[in-house]
Image: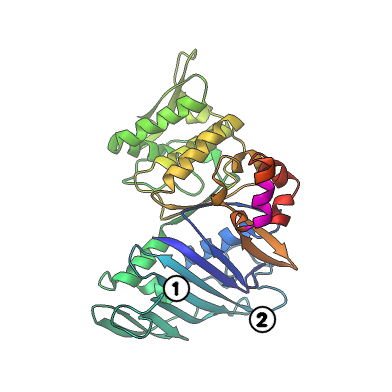
């Protein structure tokens, strides 16, 4: 499953924002254009399918303007999802304010076009206010009444018999968001409890537990991880994970040529820990269903960026990946068709694909693809796209 198209109306810089998305999108744009707002909105959707929406909508955003100005105190969304079936599904909804008194005005899951033998789109879930209907193609249906106005109906879809809506909820619950600035090196440097099939925490704090899982349960992925480290880290020898700390706790160790004893993660630099997190995410046997990473190039050596870009492209065969970057050299490591720009026009964010610009394509044909890096640094890329 992956997002095919996303439309947001009324949220932060998104007056009427539409993005057509592929398996991997490398997003660039000036500060304040809306890259972080896009990730924040997707995180809001993820959080809202397993917990009530807080009065401030986005936790910790008290005092911030979340609704688009000028405009009413509400926002709407539409997400078209390729669910690996002939007909996609669309999840849409509307949240109304003001802050502190929010409620879900409407919510709907439907087929993107009529199912075979039907004239109208099939409605899997529909609400108006707190009343709703939920059903699936196998004639399994029931009505419901939500107990709270700040609760998504999708969050209540816990019956696996409702395969489409339940599958959508589970898919969105597995979205993950990482940022180079949120990786908590101090937590990574400490021993952590062993977990069964762990997902890497969004601050990276359980990295040793994830590495232990790979070492013991998925040796091929663990060996691949080590091979990539050897290709970008001079002198790297091997990784191991050992029992240290309290009962049931482990920490990873790193060996280097010329160093007699193994180094634990506590001995590594912040940049090395970030790089280890990014490579680990790329080799996970079961990656997140959507992987959003903000500026993975921060704090890592430029020689690692071509390898990291290749790993992310390979991982995009198994999951959808959205990256945000300001690094011209990093974006040059991706295919031109994988680049996207978020830019502001008259105070409103818009999503554009450079590959659709005839002017830009002619420019690159005249001067070569290497010109793209200089155009990004000068903001010419955004103006011509």
Q: Per the image, is 130 magenta?
A: no
Tally the numbered discs.
2
Residue occupying image coordinates x 65% and y 45%? 365
Residue occupying image coordinates x 35% and y 48%? 286
**Tag 2: Cα neighbours inside 10 Å, few (<14), some, or many (≥20)?**
few
Q: Quadrant of residue 60?
A: bottom right
Looking at the picture, tell me which residue is in the foreground, 4 or 132: 4
Quadrant where the C terminus is found in the figure: bottom right
Name the residue tied to disc 1.
91
Name the residue tied to disc 2.
72
Disc 2 versus disc 1: nearer the observer: 1
Q: Quadrant of residue 37?
A: bottom right
Q: Residue 241, which numbered label?
A: none
Task: Reply above or below: 80 against 36.
Answer: below
Sooner in the amino-acid sequence: mark 2 or mark 1: 2
Quadrant where the N terminus is found in the figure: bottom left
Task: Reply above or below: 109 against 208.
Answer: below
Report the side of 152 relative to 325 (left or right).
Answer: left
Main secondary structure along the magenta-highlighted residues: helix
Report the side of 181 relative to 194 (left or right).
Answer: right
Point out residue 89 in the picture as x, y percentages from the top left corner. 40, 71
Point out residue 129 in the picture as x, y percentages from the top left corner. 47, 86
**Mark 1, secondary structure of its residue:** strand
Q: Per the image, is 361 magenta?
A: yes
Q: Quadrant of residue 304?
A: top right
Give the residues drawn in magenta, as a range. 357-364
Residue occupying image coordinates x 23% and y 78%? 138
Task: Reply above or below: 102 against 377.
Answer: below
């Amino acid at each position: 499953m992956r997002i095919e198209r996303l439309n947001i109306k009324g949220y932060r810089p998104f007056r009427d924002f539409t993005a057509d998305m592929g398996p991997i999108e490398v997003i660039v744009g000036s500060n304040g254009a809306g890259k972080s707002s896009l990730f924040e909105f997707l995180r809001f959707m993820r959080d809202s399918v397993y917990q009530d929406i807080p009065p401030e909508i986005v936790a910790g955003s008290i005092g911030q303007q979340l609704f688009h100005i000028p405009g009413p105190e509400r926002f709407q969304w539409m997400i078209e999802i390729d669910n690996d079936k002939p007909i996609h599904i669309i999840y849409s909804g509307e949240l109304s304010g003001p802050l502190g008194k929010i409620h879900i005005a409407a919510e709907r899951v439907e087929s993107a076009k009529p199912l075979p033998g039907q004239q109208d789109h099939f409605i899997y879930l529909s609400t108006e206010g707190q009343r709703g209907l939920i059903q699936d193609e196998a004639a399994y249906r029931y009505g419901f009444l939500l107990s709270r106005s700040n609760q998504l109906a999708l969050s209540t879809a816990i019956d696996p018999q409702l395969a489409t809506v339940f599958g959508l909820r589970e898919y969105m619950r597995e979205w993950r968001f990482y940022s180079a600035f949120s990786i908590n090196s101090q937590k990574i440097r400490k021993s952590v409890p062993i977990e069964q099939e762990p997902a890497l925490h969004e601050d990276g704090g359980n990295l040793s537990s994830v590495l232990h899982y790979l070492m013991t349960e998925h040796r091929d992925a663990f060996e691949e991880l080590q091979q990539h480290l050897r290709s970008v880290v001079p002198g790297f020898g091997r990784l191991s994970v050992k029992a240290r700390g309290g009962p049931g706790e482990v920490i990873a160790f790193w060996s280097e040529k010329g160093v007699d004893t193994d180094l634990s993660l506590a001995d590594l630099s912040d940049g090395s820990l970030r790089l280890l997190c990014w490579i680990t995410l790329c080799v996970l046997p079961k990656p997140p269903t959507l992987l959003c990473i903000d500026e993975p190039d921060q704090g890592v050596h430029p020689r690692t960026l071509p390898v990291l870009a290749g790993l992310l492209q390979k991982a995009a065969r198994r999951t959808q990946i959205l990256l945000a970057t300001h690094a011209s050299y990093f974006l040059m490591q991706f295919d031109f068709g994988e680049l996207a720009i978020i830019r502001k026009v008259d105070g409103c964010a818009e999503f554009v694909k450079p590959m659709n610009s005839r002017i830009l394509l002619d420019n690159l044909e005249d001067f070569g693809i290497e010109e793209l890096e200089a155009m990004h640094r000068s903001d010419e890329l955004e103006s011509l796209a």
